[in-house]
Every structure is written in structure tokens, then in C-alpha cells.
Amino acid sequence: MVQAEGKTFEFESEEALTPEVLETFPYEYAGREALVELSTDEWSCVCPFSGLPDFGRLTVRYLPSDCCIELKSFKYYLTSFRQVGIYQEHAANKVLDDLVTCCVPTWMEVVLDYRPRGGIQTVVTVQSGER
């Protein structure tokens, strides 16, 4: 457990994340462009400054090359963020890096649209590859 300095909420470090649970299945239509979109409005992680939870919508769009992300494993992976202290901008990049490593898509985009807190809306968009 990590504790934000001067704060009372405890949270896990990024070492608690579990990208190893991600699985794939073969994409049988290699050569055919198919845009895959995965989304959930149940995204949650913890602010490493305050220890307070951050909630939002996560959207992943990708063009598969040889394989696709298996959804159940994706859900398990996302759940590993719930008690992890990670800045919003870093969370988007971490998800992108882990998913690109998992399925090696032609192109991928991750959008984290956080619910406003303190009157501030944050949307982080990161991409990998060429569309």
C-alpha cells in the first residue's frame, strides 16, 4: 500500500496492475480492415495525489492485425486499476502500452473521459500506429 503524503486514503502502486491476464484470439480476416471498439463507463482508478477515486468512461478503438483482445480478460485487466494510484494522463498511456503489447494492432486509440471533479473535466486521448 502507498499512502498519499498527508492524506488518509491508501492505494496500491502501479505494480498491482495485471497486464499478464490479457488474452487474445486469432483474427480470421487478416487483410480486411475492421474497426473494433470496446468501451465501458465503469472505469475507475485512484488519484495518487489525493487518494480519492477517479471515475470515467474508457473507450478503446483498434484495427486488429493478427489477433483481437478477448473481452473477459480485458475486464479482469481493467479491474486491476481500481485501487491503483495513477495520474489520469499516465493511466491512458499505460492502458495503450499494455494493449498494444497484448495484440499488436495496426492502429489503436485509447480515450479516457473522466467525470468532472472540482469543476474540471479531463479527457485524455493517446494513439499508437497508423490508421
Image (cartoon, rainbow, N blue to C red):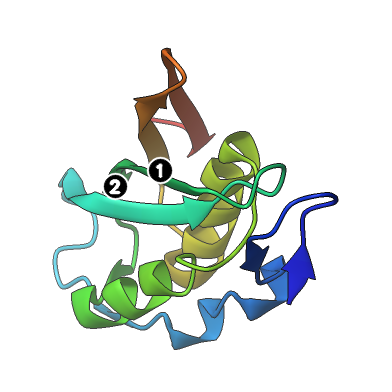
> Among all residues in the image, which is located at the extreme top?
119
Q: Using the image as rendered, state which of residue 67 and residue 119 is in the foreground.
A: 119
Residue 129 % position (x, y): 51, 38
Please name the residue shown 77% across and 63% down the image.
3
CB atoms at circles 2 and 1 under 8 Å apart?
yes
Please name the residue shown 15% across and 47% down the image.
34
> Can residue 12 be seen at all in this image of the molecule?
yes
Numbered marks: total: 2
The residue mark sitting in front, 2 or 1, is 1
Label 1: few (<14), some or many (≥20) within 10 Å?
many
In the image, is residue 105 above or below residue 115? Answer: below
- In the rendered structure, which amino acid carries the disc numbered 1? Met
> Which image quarter holds the N terminus?
bottom right
In the image, is residue 74 above or below residue 57? Answer: below
Q: Which mark is residue 108?
A: 1
> Can residue 33 be seen at all in this image of the molecule?
no
- In the rendered structure, which amino acid carries the disc numbered 2? Leu
The kind of secondary structure element at disc 2 is: strand
In the image, is residue 102 above or below residue 115? Answer: below
The answer to whether 21 appears left or right of 113 in the picture is right
Q: Using the image as rendered, state which of residue 107 and residue 13 is in the foreground.
A: 13
Q: Using the image as rendered, state which of residue 9 and residue 125 is in the foreground.
A: 9
The kind of secondary structure element at disc 1 is: strand
Label 2, label 1: how many angstroms apart (C-alpha)?
7 Å
> Which image quarter holds the C terminus?
top left
Q: Which residue is mark 2?
A: 63
Please name the residue shown 33% across and 68% down the image.
66
Please name the residue shown 34% across and 80% down the image.
76
The answer to whether 38 appears left or right of 101 in the picture is left
